[in-house]
Amino acid sequence: MLERPLLEMRNLKTYFKVRGNILKAVDDVSFTLAPGETLGLVGESGCGKSVTAATIMGLIPIPPGMIAGGEIYFNGVDLLKLPESRMRKIRGCDISMIFQEPMTSLNPVFTVGDQVGEVIELHEKLSRSEIRRRIIDAFRLVGIPAPEKRLDDYPHQMSGGMRQRVMIAMALACNPRMMIADEPTTALDVTIQAQILELMNDLKRKTGTAILFITHDLGVIAEMAQKVAVMYAGKVMELATAADLYTEPKHPYTVGLLSSIPVLGKTSKKQRLSTIRGVVPSLFSLPPGCLFSDRCPETREICQNEDPPMTTLADKRLVRCFNYA
Amino acid sequence: MFGFIIRRTLAVIPTLLGVTIVVFFMLAITPGDPAELLLGERATQESLDAMREYLGLKKPLYIQYGMFLKRVVQFDLGETIWSRQKVSIEIKERFPATIELALVAMVISSFFGVLFGIISATKQYSWFDYVSMVGSLIGVSMPVFWLGLIFMLLFSLTLGWFPMSGRIGIDTNLQVITNFYIIDAIITRNWPALMDCLRHIALPALALSTIPLAIVSRMTRSSMLEVLRQDYIKTAKAKGLGQMKIIFKHALRNGLIPVITVIGLQFGILLGGAILTETVFAWPGVGKWLYEGVVKRDYMVIQGGTLLVATSFVIVNLLVDILYAVINPRISVK
Amino acid sequence: MKLLNKIIPFFEAATQREDRHPFFDQIEKLFSNKTGLAGLIIITFFLAIALFAPLLTPYDPIENALYEQLKPPIWESGGAIKNILGTDDLGRDILSRIIYGARVSITVGIVSVGIALFFGAIMGAVAGYYKGWLDNLIMRLMDILLAFPHILLAIVIVAYLGPGLKNAMIAIGIITIPRFARIVRASVMEEFEKDYVTAARAAGATDFRIIFNAILPNCMAPIIVQASLGFGSAILDAAGLSFLGLGAQPPIPEWGAMIASGRSMILRAWWVMTFPGIAILFAVLGFNLLGDGLRDALDPRLRD
């Protein structure tokens, strides 16, 4: 991949000031996303994946939030330095976003057609009939049957899966270069989940949109992403290609995550599913040294005192662990 | 939708019947001869006998109620003791004044209430938010009749900006058509009269608007705060919409739904709650008339006025319910 | 905002103290709640002046003093230290009358809210517990009461009962019943589903016992909130009725009646009607603040 990356995040630090405490929600996160590529951002809830996405979109409320450092280059421009007015033109047009809750992410008092049309109207100068045609095209693209009729529906008249298709149509309406999908299938039934994932893979092939795919579900990532970044308590612990990560996880946290996924046939009845002991530390009381040290099965003395650096391994993967430093 | 309206309208009938029962029995259980109560002390024997016949006093109570109900349905509300005029005619003359006052007060309180509520919600915990929240708490704690007197003292007696009382100056000519003076002045293009009417209505409307203003701004604030937390606001931001468009299009359309209900309910309350304000400002509406009926113990006026105010209150509430369903697409399918 | 909501619970979990009766948390919340505390201070002040009225006032609130008529308050020219807030047309000290007026207003609050609470709680509990036709009947009745705009019903009731403070309190009590009935009904219905009620029923407790010993104590929070707010509106309504001459009759030092008596001399002696109104405003504000504070402290679900 010698292409210039579409998105390059360098040492991003997004903190929150809550009642006198500084919360390091995202701490020193770096990654790149090439055009047409899908990067999976994985981690347990509260690990900073959603904050990372919100920072890219410029949707962090300031205060209490603050960008303590780092750059986010999109197409060569640092998004963090852009004024709100220019950022607004990028939002929904160059970078769009779909959310976890299709049931509540659509405004209940407008028809779905209006809501998709609004993005097109906002970013492109088109006549009403052209907009309508574009809405129908977008609906057809995401596989909504009878789009001419459905666009006059209100959100409550649609199922969860259909609403998520509307959200995707809205996100793709302006042919964005990049799409952020924040747990887009978590709230859906398993069968619908599979349909939506298939749809997204299909659309990616057709449109060439790069996707930042956020999820806590490693199983979903396996189907979607070429590259995976594993986050823990605001830091990236391991960044590797999906193939490398699944076949040979390096970081003890990744190892733990992967071994806690039940695999059909592999896990016998006698064998108990392994778990990671302990819980995610509160961002208010992080352990000193390596953030994972208090739960790590391979923890050593140095882990509890010093913060491990990000190390580049021979296969170009990045690991934040003293085992490889 | 249509079915909903029919069902909701039918559900009002028992309440209205209940209102007539209350009004009827209040007179029935008042000690003394109802005919004497209704005609006053100076009534002649013949008129008393005629009244007893008219009310059916010799018949059982439920038949009396039936007769009462029949008269009410035919808008026959009897005659007043003092002016010997039909109650229905007196109401027709006075009700427009009350509606006019309540409407102007509601326009003031809805506009400023919604405005203050939106600013408070978008700038939560700012000085504006604190001032308007404390202000609305004071507003609902205020005795309105006292506030009216203070307004009168300041803006009328001391500063002389507004007339002290009444609905229109005695030397102002206005051709009365609808009995809504503001409308009459506009359709006859009588601008001096319009100015005079507005100057007269200003103080009572302002005093009357205090409580609804406080309630509407509080309601708008909490409703908008709730809406601004919703996921679809995040979606709207992610679309690239500007702050103003998010607040006034996406948030307000949702946030106003409960506020409109509150505004409607407040309007209903004002129709009956204007008694004190109308009395303070000598506003010739139903409230002042009803109060005078109470003081003079004119029971026909009390009955008629009570029925009118309660019925309009119930009907306004019904309209609010229907309006709520119309503006809220989530309800209409049910 | 939602991101922050995700983060804050981590913090709260860390600071929560254990092994304490929730009641103490509620009291602490009330005291740390500025609105509630401000309300409590105002109410305590009014209670104190009502209680110690004879000790605080140098003048009789009722007896006329014909040589002291319409003296202005102390800071106006002609005012004197004798009558800080001036005197009325019968030479009575306004401040003394306002202080005694606190007694009247607090009595009105207690009696009216008492009546409303007593009948409202019984009706609401019966409706919520037995459901069915009884519930229907009672709630229809409440709907009819609510079909009359607030003050109008009180005025009409007094019109039939005859003017006077006693009847005004009864009338205000009656119009306040639906508030309590509705709240108690809703709470009883909610509590009825819970296990401890089922347990009490299984143990063979009588309905009366279940309602009053088991269910009602568990829905005190909304009742207390409503009582505080009801207290404020009772004072306001009583002042309105007295202003119209339907409540307290002269020479009782009632705030609304004082405003009414000052109305005719609004230009000559503005202080006669101004100060009682301020007293009403503060007393009602106190109860509204307390009600709001209690709502936040006792039952966050009830927030508007």
Image: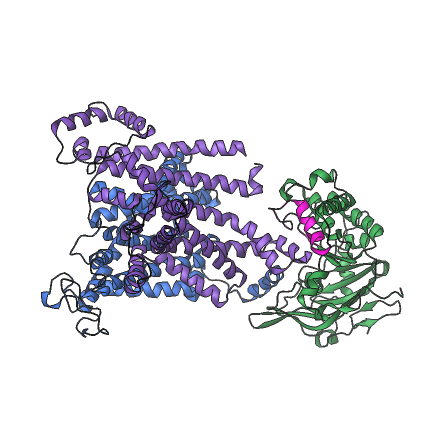
Chain colours: A green, B purple, C blue
Q: Nearer the viewer, residue A53 or A131?
A: A131
Q: Is residue C164 left or right of residue B249?
A: left
Image quadrant where one finds the N terminus of chain A: bottom right
Magenta residue check for A114: yes
The residue lying at 78 percent from left, 45 percent from top is A141
Q: Which of the 4 image quadrants contains residue B54?
A: top left
Q: In the rendering, at what x and y percent does residue A197 appear?
A: 78, 49
Q: Is residue C137 left or right of residue A251?
A: left
Q: Which residues are magenta?
A: A98-124
Q: In the rendering, at what x and y percent does residue B317 appear?
A: 43, 41
The residue lying at 54 percent from left, 34 percent from top is B1
Position above or below: C165 against A249: above
Q: In the rendering, at what x and y percent does residue A163 appear?
A: 69, 45
Q: Nearer the viewer, residue B147 or B151?
A: B151
Q: Is residue C295 left or right of residue B39?
A: right
The residue lying at 13 percent from left, 62 percent from top is C90
Magenta residue check for A112: yes
Q: Is residue C204 visible?
A: no
Q: In the rendering, at what x and y percent does residue C234 appear?
A: 30, 52
Image quadrant where one finds the C terminus of chain A: bottom right
Q: Nearer the viewer, residue B153 or C281?
A: B153
Q: Is residue B49 visible?
A: yes
